[in-house]
């Protein structure tokens, strides 16, 4: 093999440039698709927390329905759903640390802050099949329509079988369940008190 | 070595030199992604793609690569293909990308790829190297799918997400947790090794 000083350096530079070029092109070519996927995912999440039916999985259709009902408020990250001029509710980001990492998602409350409309998670790193079941429908559906007016001290969500419990935790994933409920309670409380509601 | 027949290459990759239960490499990911069959399948396909194409590329440029920087070159090539897989999943299979999460990026640390590049592609022509990558990746994927089959069946009562056991089935939590993969992998390695020693006994006189 060639025994010179400059050849390996030149070789490395050329090969790095070549492959970087390929990757840069691929990244450029798929940037729009990836951005659209992420946007669709967010829209899907928000439509879900407001409990609006999705007729199909088509990104265009999701976008149409999203634009029809939901818009972002002046406060970044907080969304409002309207039907005509009637406000249905507000969605806001929730999140906190769970067993393995942070969990992020959205929760929505009704316009008068009296009911929880729904929750959904956009990111978590819990064990699939255990803590990961927080993203399953049966778990999330339990939060629909929970009454927020009778809670004491910001404890909106309480696991059964505790007194006044309203939600089932996940068997075998106590830590994840508890963390999720803790940050949901905190974030909902914070949102409602900041908005001056909750009386 | 120059012209290994495809049959021999596949026999080596799938059995004689199977990366997981003979060479015991690529174990980390076989423990991590095997709780659902679909995750294992996508991971396996990703690995086959990366191993085959890295081996091919390394083999094509092997005569121009200065010997003492070949590892750097290999890592560069491997990472390029891993990033391609990552971009592809993000763009066209976002659900899968979400499920596999950081593991896609970690394909690069999978010893199988580097092992094949360094151990085979560096000294062999492109086509056999390419096939060798596919064979090794396939050997890995099959073992992953076997582990995932057992884990998903007992852990969830499903196969590829389809319910096999009815409501009476109580999920085995242990199967969903990483330790289960250790037990199953251990049993597979045990089975493969005892099978190997049987083969050796039978063919002992010839060799």
Image: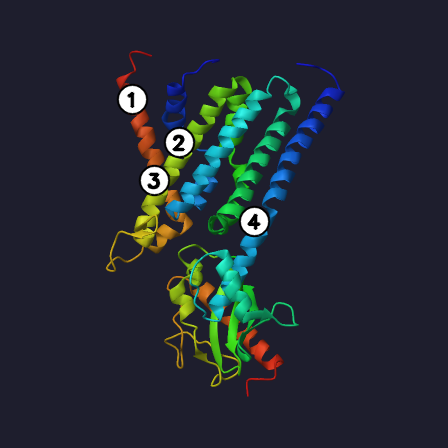
Q: Give the residue pinned by disc 1.
A: B199
Which residue is depicted at the point 53% across and 66% down? A66
Q: Are marks 2 and 3 in contact (CB under 8 Å)?
A: no
Q: In terms of sequence position, does the residue under pointer 2 or pointer 1 come before the other?
A: 2
Q: Residues within 10 Å of mark 4 (few under 14, many from 20)?
A: some
Q: In terms of sequence position, does the residue under pointer 1 or pointer 3 come before the other?
A: 3
Q: Looking at the image, which is closer to me, B49 or B105?
A: B49
Secondary structure category for the residue under label 4: helix
Secondary structure category for the residue under label 3: helix
- Relative vertical location of residue A13 with respect to residue A199 in this rendering, above or below: above
Respond whether the residues carrying marks 4 and 1 are from the same subunit: no
Relative to B125, B31 lies left or right: left
Q: Chain of mark 3?
A: B
- Residue lying farthest right? A6
Respond whether the residues carrying marks 4 and 2 are from the same subunit: no
Looking at the rendering, in which quadrant would you find the C terminus of chain B? top left
Respond whether the residues carrying marks 2 and 3 are from the same subunit: yes
Residue A107 horizontal/vertical position (percent): 52, 70
Q: Chain of mark 4?
A: A
Q: Give the residue pinned by disc 3.
A: B146
Of badges 2 and 1, the one in the foreground is: 2
Which residue is depicted at the point 43% across and 65% down? A174
Q: Give the residue pinned by disc 4.
A: A33
Q: Quadrant of residue B76?
A: top right
Q: Residues within 10 Å of mark 3 (few under 14, many from 20)?
A: some
Relative to B166, B58 lies left or right: right
Residue A44 horizontal/vertical position (percent): 49, 62
Respond whether the residues carrying marks 4 and 3 are from the same subunit: no
Q: Give the residue pinned by disc 2.
A: B139
């Amino acid at each position: 093999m060639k025994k010179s000083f400059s050849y390996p350096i030149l070789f490395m530079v050329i090969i790095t440039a070549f492959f970087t070029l390929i990757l840069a092109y691929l990244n450029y070519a798929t940037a729009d698709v990836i951005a659209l996927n992420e946007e669709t995912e967010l829209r899907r999440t928000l439509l879900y927390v407001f409990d609006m039916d999705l007729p199909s999985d088509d990104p265009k259709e999701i976008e149409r329905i999203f634009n029809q009902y939901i818009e972002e408020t002046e406060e970044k990250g907080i969304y409002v759903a309207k039907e005509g001029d009637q406000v249905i509710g507000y969605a806001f980001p929730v999140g906190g640390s769970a067993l393995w990492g942070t969990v992020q998602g959205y929760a929505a409350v009704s316009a008068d802050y009296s009911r929880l409309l729904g929750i959904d998670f956009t990111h978590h790193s819990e064990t699939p099949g255990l803590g990961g079941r927080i993203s399953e429908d049966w778990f999330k559906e339990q939060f629909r329509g929970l009454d927020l007016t009778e809670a004491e001290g910001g404890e909106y969500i309480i696991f059964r079988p505790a007194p006044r419990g309203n939600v089932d935790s996940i068997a075998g994933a106590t830590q994840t369940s508890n963390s999720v409920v803790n940050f949901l309670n905190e974030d909902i409380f914070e949102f409602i008190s900041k908005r001056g509601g909750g009386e | 070595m120059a012209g290994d027949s495809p049959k021999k290459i596949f026999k080596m990759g799938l059995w004689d030199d199977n990366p997981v239960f003979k060479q015991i490499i690529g174990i980390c990911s076989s423990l991590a992604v095997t709780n659902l069959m679909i995750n294992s399948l996508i991971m396996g396909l990703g690995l086959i793609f990366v191993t085959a194409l890295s081996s091919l590329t390394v083999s094509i440029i092997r005569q121009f690569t200065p010997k003492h920087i070949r590892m750097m070159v290999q890592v560069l090539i491997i990472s390029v293909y891993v990033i391609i897989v990552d971009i592809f999943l993000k763009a066209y299979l976002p659900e899968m990308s979400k499920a596999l999460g950081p593991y896609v990026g970690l394909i690069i640390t999978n010893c199988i790829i580097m092992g094949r590049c360094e151990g085979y592609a560096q000294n062999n022509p492109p086509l056999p190297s390419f096939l060798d990558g596919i064979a090794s990746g396939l050997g890995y994927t099959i073992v992953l799918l076997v582990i995932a089959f057992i884990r998903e069946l007992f852990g969830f009562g499903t196969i590829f997400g389809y319910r096999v056991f009815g409501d009476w089935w109580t999920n085995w939590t242990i199967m969903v947790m990483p330790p289960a993969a250790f037990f199953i992998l251990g049993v597979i390695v045990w089975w493969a090794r005892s099978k190997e020693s049987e083969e050796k006994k039978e063919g002992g006189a010839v060799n």
